[in-house]
Amino acid sequence: MRMTSKERVLRTLAHESPDRVPINYSANAGIDRKLKAHYGLREDDGEGLARVLGVDFRSVGAPHIGPKLHPDFPERGVYSSDWGMRTRWIEHGTGGYWDFCEFPLKDADLETIKNWPMPHPDHYDYSRILEDCERHKDFAIVAGGAGLGDILNSTGMVFGVERTLMDLCMDEEGILHYLDRRLEITYEIQRRIFEAAKGRIDILWIGEDLGTQIAPIISLDLFRRHIRPRHQPYIDLAKKYGARVMVHTCGSSSWAYPDFIEMGVDGVDTLQPEATNMSPEYLKKHFGKPLAFCGCISTPCCRRSSTATIWRPRSRRCKISRKWRRALCRSTSICFRSLASACARGSCRSWRWRMPSACCRWRQATAMRILTSPAFTIRSAS
């Protein structure tokens, strides 16, 4: 019997077999435009594209409607977010991207940090959240994002990475005040979103990048001192409203998973299999019962490898996960524009229509976020 998208995702997160692989999608602006053009959609028709691709997730949130708090600097091509993070457009051979720059609190004193302008929870529009949830009631409703609750990345975007790490190690008053003030605001915004949704949110997505490709970025002691206690309130909030929790963390991050389990995390995003202690074999052996994992299709590897090189390990990894009811899969990065939009189209078709006897061309699985049940076997194309 065909399931709704919500049923499909919740069964997968409950480690049960769905009728087909749940699919999510994320891509950079260049790929997104190409996909919409291919399907004859307007550039602003995100919902149309989601339906064409069979996406099972829908996000809800509250847009900022308050005053602009931080100036732009168009004369040097720099633009500021509501939180004061500055970005500049960087061109490359096939397009470009917005990169963080200038780091306005890099050399700031305590007074400047304490007076740094931040949005107020009253300056967000919560009025359409319930309507959005009702409109997408058959889909898995997600609140938050990979940056919600994030400490290292988001703070580094205004303090710079060097000062962020040094100040956290030294328990500097300024950065701790900044963190607690920002997280208090984002927590209250999220609380109001949950309240407005009236129990209709299925997943809270938070994040913290904890690993390089080969090792932790920070020590376990630092994680427990400054990150874990600041993430716990978000997890408790989600549980209060009956939602599951997915934590985004890149690279070699399994060293933190025992703490995630104790905190009440349900799933980890993303699983980057080439990183140290992140292979499906390792995760199944050490964390196969309490956690679900989202990832295993590494787009950086796809970009630098031949098709034949990619197929063999991917096929092996998915066969390992066949009977592992805790596994979820998706691409581990947003697709680069240099990869043709045909990859995204072919990948969605493979995952959506060819399961359970899928012959998924792994070189195509690069422009979307995918959740899958391990009950399916995914074989490389011959």
Image (cartoon, rainbow, N blue to C red):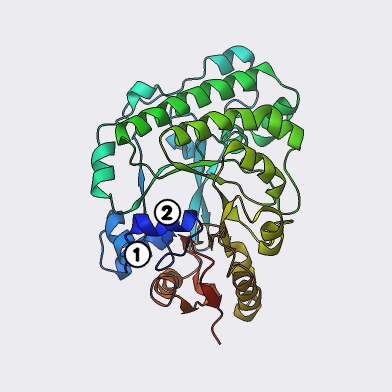
Label number found at residue 10: 2
Label 1 secondary element: loop
Task: Say whether residue 224 is left or right of residue 303.
Answer: right
- Closer to the camera in the image, 113 or 131: 131
In percent of the image, x 31 and y 55: which residue is there? Answer: 46
Q: Is residue 104 visible?
A: yes
Residue 202 placement (x, y as % from top left): 40, 45
Quarter holding the N terminus is bottom left
Residue 47 placement (x, y as % from top left): 29, 55
Residue 185 placement (x, y as % from top left): 46, 24
Which of the 4 image quarters holds residue 131? top left
Name the residue type under label 2: Leu
- Closer to the camera in the image, 36 or 327: 327
In percent of the image, x 72 and y 42: which residue is there? Answer: 217
Find disc 1 in the rendering and name its residue. Answer: 54
46 vs 73: above or below: below
Name the residue type under label 1: Gly
Task: Say whether residue 177 is left or right of residue 141.
Answer: right
- Closer to the camera in the image, 348 or 173: 348
